[in-house]
């Protein structure tokens, strides 16, 4: 959610000591465009005018409190309270908050949400239409009530216990359990070791009502709260509203002190392991715990920049290592991460191949030591500097397209941790100014000072089955000592300074032009080689061009026996590089360029997705040309991919998620031989030559492709399209389409229930209705609406009334190719003891589609949300790129805003019930349940 300025300013690194209970501060002035203040009761507010999107505003309610402030008897109640904010307040009874907002097209879950962390709780109501003053006032009154007027009725608390229980169950994944074990080592001696935010079931099930109310009264108070409003609003008017609505909220004179909790310092290295039966791989991390600076001044910004340079250079070296098949590592990464309000860590993490953990750690630590000893090279430094400045140049050109939620997130950080928040231009001037003054010696000095002998932590995560094979603390220390005492050679690498394309190309003629029906500004061209090009110049983003290309065929034209190789064909070439550049040299060549393109081979289509800025548009075209004309296929990369696939297979038998997904895929295809399953057969059957052949067969012939460009393209750049796209080999006589392999469930109902061993018992359920249907755009919209209607019903019946699941995901869709058909799919996790009752509700609600009209109010809310979303999307390049793809790939008619609204408004309860009846009467169904127990089936 929060804006990350691409390559730079990662998690803040700390070198100054902290005092307990201190407030965070910054010496860098707040963005001058922010209207801010603090009421007498302590409530802080920040208001910023921003027009992305126009006529919308995002409202954030930030609490400087979280799970870390709970008493032991309240473990999990900070998160529980977050849920209760949507279950009744002084001015919005019951589900009144959600109902009021959804009546105005603001959707729960998508635009109305919240999260709880150790140190904060943040609520957001996003994309609120600003022309509706009553809605703006109501949204502020929601915040007013969240501040101190939650209902917290006993009945609502008890009803929510079931929802929290199921969230607890859903979130108790292998990764969660591993982290919980690791936290006992990382946070040893700190309260953070005792809080995982969601809490324990015993407390969730049995806490007294007073415990929750006590936490609320103690910590939800104005001096720890901020109201943040960013959007197309008048800040002065909004400030007056805030003052009039929030000033009466009382502040207790005898309030508790908001404390901050330290992680105790320790000498040397602390070591710990975490294991789990369902763990997918083995990783080792070396972490250096550091203090977070209380005062965020320009020196902290400079250290952050140095840290970003360091990580970028080191991670590029790590990528080189892991691209060698003999490497013991699947991946290595260097990064900084905050772990508490007062602490951050510098981390080196390596994922190891089977049985090679010590070797992987040796590889990682050797490169860290090499960097510490010899530093970066001049070429690495200049390349990184160029890339970072280019990233910031791209940011400043598109600063007007930074959305409301991004700025609101940055203001949340400013309130909570005093992270500086400047205007885009001031931020650019500060950071780029610092980058321009950096020297290679600065980066190398930073590398030497980064690691410390004390406050080190080594954490290993692994499958439980290899627990006895894991190295001991003394083994890790021996590796580090050996490397530190060894003779290492400085990093040295030959630079490839060749041009991307050595061949001289000239622009080919435009054979003809065509209009795009309904989109006047779009221009169509047929090039001399038969390539179809569609260009839509826009000014929605100051410096963005989106690219897509597509052709019909895809994997449907690949023989069944060769499908395994179709799965890896584009991965192989994307990992091998293009032209005269292997993947490492290509990355170096593209440093400082804002351009990327990647080929894909889908089920029924093949093509490209890409983007660039205006300046690097030619680079985007060069990449596309080379992926057609000069793809690389590196046998060493193929061997590496195959080895990595084999590593994944080693833990596949423990992966319940994979087992469930495979079972669903086989049921939906009636075990069709063309169903892709990642298993031993896949690894055994992939072949280097066949993968090459499939790629060359699918990514070829420009005359069979449509190339779509949307963004700030100028007329003079059409010549570049003629130069590169126009020179791709083609055969206008050869046009392909897809083949329908009739992949569908068997007739009637398919039921697959199977058991899997689980650490935390849960049932995972999936239901899908599918069948043939006549395609129309109105029917496609109606299918989407049916999915949304069911989501609302299941939110009420399964989540709220039964407390049976954290949430039911429902999606209704219509597809045109390879044959017109509908899909209505849903899935959820639940308590196995409630499985049968919940499945009864599922099938009852599905059958209601046929028997009863939908709730009129729910239908209107969904339609309003769709119209609102269309209004917000129509000023984005991604919207128009999708529209043009729909027109030229799926042969849909473009609907202007008026026509779209006419269709949506014509949809009514009668048409939805009619379609619902058709779905029930003409569908084949699939029901898959994965239950805990002795393992059966997948």
Image (tube, grey):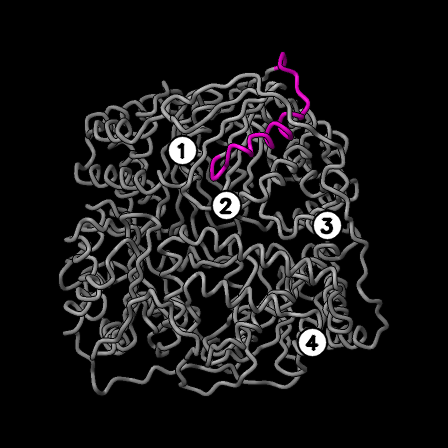
- Asked whether the viewer can see residue 257, the reply is yes
* Image mark for residue 584: 3
Between disc 1 and disc 2, the foreground one is 1
Q: Earlier in the sequence, mark 4 or mark 2?
A: 4
The answer to whether residue 616 is above or below residue 40 is above
Find residue 616 and report its horizontal and vertical position in percent. 59, 43
Q: Is residue 568 left or right of residue 938?
A: right
Q: Is residue 830 magenta?
A: no
Crowding near the residue tagged with mark 4, few <14, some 14–19, many ≥20 C-alpha atoms within 10 Å = some
Q: Earlier in the sequence, mark 4 or mark 3?
A: 4
Find residue 492 and report its horizontal and vertical position in percent. 81, 60
Find residue 627 and report its horizontal and vertical position in percent. 67, 34
Q: Earlier in the sequence, mark 1 or mark 3?
A: 3
> What is the spatial separation of the Cα atoms under label 4 and label 1, in whole angstroms?
59 Å
Q: Earlier in the sequence, mark 4 or mark 1?
A: 4
- Judging depth in this view, the residue of 330 and 522 nearest the camera is 522
Q: Residue furthest front?
A: 716
Which quadrant is the C terminus positioned in? Answer: top right
The answer to whether residue 892 is above or below residue 182 is above
User: What residue does disc 1 label?
Assistant: 768
Between disc 1 and disc 3, the foreground one is 3
Residue at 46%, 80% in the rendered image: 295
Residues at discs 4 and 2 in contact (Cβ within 8 Å) = no
Residues at discs 1 and 3 in contact (Cβ within 8 Å) = no
User: What residue does disc 2 label?
Assistant: 755
Residue span colored magenta: 710-734
User: What residue does disc 4 label?
Assistant: 445
Q: Is residue 722 magenta?
A: yes
Find residue 193 and report its horizontal and vertical position in percent. 48, 75
Q: Earlier in the sequence, mark 1 or mark 2?
A: 2
Q: Residue furthest top?
A: 733
Residue at 57%, 17% in the rendered image: 511
């Amino acid at each position: 959610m929060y804006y990350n300025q691409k390559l730079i300013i990662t998690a803040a690194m700390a070198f100054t000591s902290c005092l307990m209970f201190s407030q965070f501060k910054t010496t860098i002035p707040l963005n001058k465009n922010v209207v801010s203040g603090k009421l007498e009761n302590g409530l802080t507010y920040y208001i910023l005018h921003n027009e992305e999107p126009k006529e919308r505003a995002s409202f954030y309610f930030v609490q400087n409190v979280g799970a870390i402030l709970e008493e032991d008897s309240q473990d999990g109640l900070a998160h529980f309270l977050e849920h209760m904010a949507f279950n009744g307040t002084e001015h919005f009874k019951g589900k009144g908050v959600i109902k009021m907002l959804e009546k105005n097209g603001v959707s729960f879950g998508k635009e109305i949400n919240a999260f709880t962390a150790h140190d904060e709780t943040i609520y957001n109501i996003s994309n609120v239409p600003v022309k509706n003053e009553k809605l703006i006032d109501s949204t502020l009154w929601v915040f007013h009530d969240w501040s101190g007027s939650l209902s917290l009725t006993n009945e609502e608390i008890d009803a929510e216990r079931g929802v929290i229980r199921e969230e607890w169950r859903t979130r108790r994944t292998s990764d969660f359990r591993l982290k919980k074990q690791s936290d006992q080592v990382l946070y040893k001696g700190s309260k953070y070791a005792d809080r995982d935010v969601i809490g324990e079931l015993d407390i969730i099930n049995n806490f007294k009502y007073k415990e929750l109310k006590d936490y609320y009264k103690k910590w939800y108070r104005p001096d720890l709260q901020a109201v943040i409003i960013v959007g197309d609003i008048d800040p002065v008017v909004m400030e007056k509203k805030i003052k009039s609505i929030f000033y009466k909220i009382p502040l207790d004179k005898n309030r508790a002190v908001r404390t901050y909790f330290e992680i105790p310092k320790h000498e040397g290295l602390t070591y710990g392991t975490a294991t789990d039966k369902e763990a997918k791989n083995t990783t080792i991390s070396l972490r250096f715990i550091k203090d977070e600076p209380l005062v965020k001044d320009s020196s902290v910004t400079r250290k952050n920049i140095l840290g970003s340079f360091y990580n970028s250079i080191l991670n590029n070296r790590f990528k080189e290592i892991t691209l060698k098949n003999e490497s013991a590592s699947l991946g290595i990464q260097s990064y900084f991460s905050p772990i508490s309000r007062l602490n951050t860590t510098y981390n080196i993490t390596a994922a190891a191949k089977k049985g090679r953990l010590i070797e992987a750690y040796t590889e990682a630590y050797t490169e860290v030591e090499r960097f510490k000893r010899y530093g970066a090279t001049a070429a690495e430094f200049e390349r990184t500097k160029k890339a970072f400045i280019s990233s910031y140049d791209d940011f400043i050109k598109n600063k007007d397209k930074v959305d409301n939620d991004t700025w609101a997130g940055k203001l949340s950080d400013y309130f909570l941790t005093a992270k500086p928040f400047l205007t885009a231009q001031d931020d650019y001037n500060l950071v780029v100014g610092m980058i321009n003054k950096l020297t290679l010696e600065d980066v190398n000095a930073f590398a030497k000072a980064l690691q410390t002998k004390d406050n080190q932590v080594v954490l290993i995560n692994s499958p439980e089955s290899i627990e006895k094979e894991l190295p001991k603390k003394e083994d890790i220390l021996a590796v580090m000592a050996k490397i530190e005492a060894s003779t290492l050679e400085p990093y040295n690498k030959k630079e490839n300074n060749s041009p991307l394309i050595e061949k001289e190309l000239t622009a080919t003629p435009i054979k003809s032009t065509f209009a795009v029906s309904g989109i006047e500004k779009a221009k169509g061209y047929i090039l001399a080689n038969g390539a179809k090009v569609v260009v839509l110049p826009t000014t929605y983003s100051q410096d963005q061009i989106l690219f897509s290309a597509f052709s019909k065929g895809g994997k449907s034209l690949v023989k069944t026996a060769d499908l395994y190789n179709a799965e890896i064909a584009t991965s192989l070439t994307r990992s091998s590089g293009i032209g005269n550049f292997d993947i490492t040299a290509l990355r170096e060549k593209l440093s400082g360029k804002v351009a990327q393109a990647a080929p894909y081979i889908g089920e029924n289509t093949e093509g490209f997705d890409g983007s660039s800025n205006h300046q690097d548009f030619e680079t985007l075209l060069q990449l596309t040309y080379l992926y057609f004309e000069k793809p690389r296929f590196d046998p060493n990369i193929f061997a590496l991919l195959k080895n990595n696939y084999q590593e994944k297979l080693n833990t596949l038998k423990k992966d319940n998620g994979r087992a469930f997904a495979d079972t669903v895929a086989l049921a939906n295809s009636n075990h069709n031989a063309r169903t892709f399953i990642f298993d031993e057969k896949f690894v055994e059957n992939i072949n280097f030559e066949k993968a090459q052949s499939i790629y060359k067969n699918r990514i070829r012939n420009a005359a069979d492709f449509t190339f779509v460009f949307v963004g700030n393209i100028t007329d003079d750049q059409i010549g570049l399209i003629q130069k590169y796209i126009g020179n791709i080999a083609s055969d206008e006589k050869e046009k392909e389409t897809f083949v329908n392999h009739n992949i569908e469930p068997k007739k009637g109902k398919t039921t697959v229930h199977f058991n899997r061993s689980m650490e935390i018992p849960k049932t995972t359920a999936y239901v899908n209705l599918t069948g043939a249907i006549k395609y129309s755009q109105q029917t496609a919209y109606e299918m989407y609406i049916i999915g949304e209607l069911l989501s609302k019903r299941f939110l009420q019946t399964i989540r709220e009334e039964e407390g049976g699941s954290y949430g039911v995901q429902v999606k209704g869709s219509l597809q045109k190719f390879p044959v017109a058909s509908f899909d209505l799919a849903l899935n959820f996790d639940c308590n196995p003891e409630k499985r049968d009752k919940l499945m009864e509700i599922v099938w009852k609600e599905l059958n209601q589609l046929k028997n009863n009209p939908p709730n009129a109010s729910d239908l209107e809310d969904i339609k309003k949300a769709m119209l609102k979303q269309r209004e917000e999307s129509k000023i984005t390049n991604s919207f128009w790129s999708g529209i043009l793809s729909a027109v030229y790939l799926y042969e849909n008619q473009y609907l202007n805003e008026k026509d779209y609204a006419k269709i949506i408004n014509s949809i009514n309860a009668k048409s939805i019930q009619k379609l619902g009846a058709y779905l029930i009467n003409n569908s084949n169904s699939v029901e898959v349940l994965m239950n805990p127990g002795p393992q059966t089936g997948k």
